Amino acid sequence: MARYFINLSFDGKRYHGWQIQPNGISVQGELQRCLSMILRTEISVVGAGRTDAGVHAKTMVVHFETTDDIDCQQLAYRLNRVLPPDISTNSIYPVNDNMHARFSAKERSYRYFVHTHRDPFVREHSVELHYALDFDAMNRAATLLLQAHDFRAFCKAHSDAKTTFCDVRRAEWVKIDNTHWYFEIAADRFLRNMVRAVVGTLIEVGRGRMTIDGMRDIIDNGTRCDAGESMPAHGLFLWSVDY
């Protein structure tokens, strides 16, 4: 039995998230269906993480196992011929048996895209905001995340996470141009809904509706009810996975 990694990209608009759902189409389900059809045996894939409905991925890494001899380049070509056009196989390569797409990952990064002026060309992959934002204040507030350990205030209620501790290593707003920005955050792990809740809270700071000290208090003592709203899914991308 040999193990392989697949590097994927996908537009999450049509999907009920990465993970197979009983009543909705998923990226995992489509990938397993196409792999199983090509290799003519039932194939299961394990992803580097779960993305919610509507969230995109520039990079999602998955692993699968097979007893067949694989021509990786040819399999990637054939997968791209049968996968839906909103899922792309970037590469396939063999890995050691102890490599795991989820548990071997050392760091993941996400980007959340926003724009402050109407733009029809990014509307499905960036969130239009109709108010002025102080990005300098938002970046000062973002540095608090680097000092934090427990992110329970940014975790979806009733999550099944065994711990709410994360090691956030990068958190900053990056200017693309005068009206387009993205928030980049990297950590060893993420909680369910965490990035969208963090972005919503930082936007409260940017609007002047929350102070930096207020955000510090939420991190130290708050619950999910105290943090900002969960931002729309379509602005969020799983950007990279490092091993």
Image (cartoon, rainbow, N blue to C red):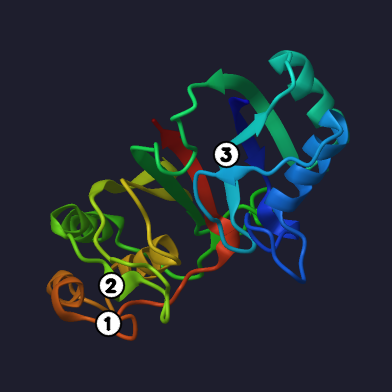
N-terminal label among 2 and 1:
2
**Mark 1 element type:** loop
Left-right relation of 203 to 10: left
**Mark 3 element type:** strand
Left-right relation of 40 to 97: right
Residue 79 against residue 123 in the figure, above or below: above
Residue 242 against residue 115 in the figure, above or below: above
Mark 1 nearby-residue class (10 Å; few <14, some 14–19, many ≥20): some
Quarter of the N terminus within the rendering: top right
Q: How far apart are marks 3 and 2 (CA)?
A: 27 Å
Q: How far apart are marks 3 and 1 (CA)?
A: 31 Å
Amino acid beneath label 3 = Lys
Pointers 3 and 2 in contact (C-beta within 8 Å): no
Q: Mark 2 points at which residue?
A: 152
| Residue 215 seen in this snapshot | yes
Quarter of the C terminus within the rendering: top left
Outermost bottom residue: 225
Pointers 2 and 1 in contact (C-beta within 8 Å): yes
Q: Name the residue under label 1.
A: 223
**Mark 2 element type:** helix
Mark 2 nearby-residue class (10 Å; few <14, some 14–19, many ≥20): many
In percent of the image, x 28 and y 66: which residue is there?
164
Residue 214 place in picture, x, y as percent: 17, 77
Residue 58, labelled with which disc? 3
In percent of the image, x 24 and y 55: which residue is there?
136
Residue 62 against residue 96 in the figure, above or below: below
Amino acid beneath label 2 = Arg
| Residue 83 seen in this snapshot | no
